[in-house]
Image (cartoon, rainbow, N blue to C red):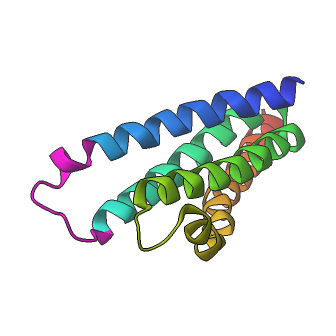
Amino acid sequence: MRLLLAAIVRLVVMGAGLAAYYAALPALFPGSNDANIGAGLLAFAGIVVVSLGWAFADARRRGSSSTVATWAIVAVAFGVLWLVGLATLEADDSVSLSERLRLDAFLVVFTAGLVLLPAALGAALGDRSRNSE
């Protein structure tokens, strides 16, 4: 239960941060209505940095095994929720929501990896720094 609660807290904070980033996009990149690769890379970098840093801090407190388990839950849930959010926002008359979800399902794996790989590295580094003290 504690693991699930920790995952939910991390998921809510990361989701709120991503929502705030999307809300700030017009101010960060004014006049850009086309695809903006820089905005996407900035979002990915933010996710990587937050996952790495937070997992590092978690592993220093709790060890790497529970940290990686927590972040695995966060990674899968974040990937699914981001896919559903994007599909909902980008749905239109030409493609239904279910078709968009099916077409973009690979994004779940990509986004989960974007969260889990840095988190696993952060957990390993945090556990190692914990053991060296």
Identified at 61% across, 66% down, the residue is 101
Count the marks: 0
Evaluate whether residue 44 shows in this view: yes
Identified at 59% across, 71% down, the residue is 99
Position above or below: 25 against 93: above
Residue 33 in the magenta stretch? The answer is: yes
Quarter-wise, where is residue 27 in the image? Answer: top left
Position above or below: 108 against 9: below
Residue 115 appears left or right of 35? right
Position above or below: 112 against 46: below
Residue 5 in the image: x percent, y percent? 78, 25
Residue 22 appears left or right of 126? left
Residue 130 in the magenta stretch? The answer is: no
Identified at 79% across, 40% down, the residue is 70
Identified at 66% across, 27% down, the residue is 9
Position above or below: 9 against 20: above
Quarter-wise, where is residue 45 in the image? Answer: bottom left
As rendered, which of 94 and 113 lies closer to the eye? 94
As rendered, which of 105 and 112 lies closer to the eye? 105
Magenta-colored span: 24-37
Q: Residue furthest left?
A: 31
Evaluate whether residue 128 shows in this view: no
Residue 5 appears left or right of 22? right
As rendered, which of 51 and 43 lies closer to the eye? 43
In which quadrant is the C terminus drawn?
Answer: top right
Residue 1 in the image: x percent, y percent? 90, 24
